[in-house]
Image (cartoon, rainbow, N blue to C red):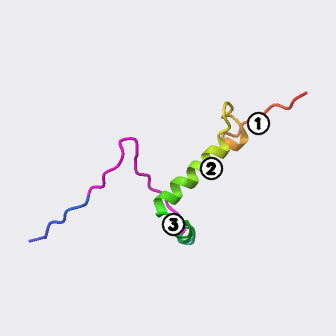
Amino acid sequence: MKPTTTQKKRDRAEDSTTVTISLKKELLAQIEEAAKLENRSRSNYIITHMMKAVARTAVAGHPDCPASGCGKKREKAS
């Protein structure tokens, strides 16, 4: 008879979700080392730096700029 295993269910905030991505092993090692240096979990490190990246690129009131990744170019001032 096969033993049954119970998976732990982690409680998450209602507004949170899980995202799965593939990374090069070298990049993951670098992320883990950087997180350790900042005394953060890997997940917290990634979330923190993704939020900073979004804040840098999403210019308030003008999401359609090259920095946002949309690819649109601003018209040159005459």
Circle 3: residue type: Asn
Q: Which mark is residue 73?
A: 1
Q: Is residue 37 left or right of residue 19?
A: right
Circle 2: residue type: Ala
| Crowd band around label 2 with a 10 angstrom C-alpha radius: few (<14), some (14–19), many (20+) | few
Q: Quadrant of the C terminus?
A: top right
Q: Is residue 25 left or right of residue 16?
A: right
Nearer to the camera, 2 or 35: 35
Mark 3 — residue? 39
| Crowd band around label 3 with a 10 angstrom C-alpha radius: few (<14), some (14–19), many (20+) | few
Percent across and percent down for residue 71 are: 70, 40
Q: Which mark is residue 53?
A: 2
State the residue at coordinates (76%, 36%): 73
**Residue 21 lies in magenta, yes or no?**
yes
Q: Quadrant of the N terminus?
A: bottom left
Circle 1: residue type: Lys
Tell me where the magenta segment starts and ends, as one range: 9-24
* In front: label 3 or label 2: 3
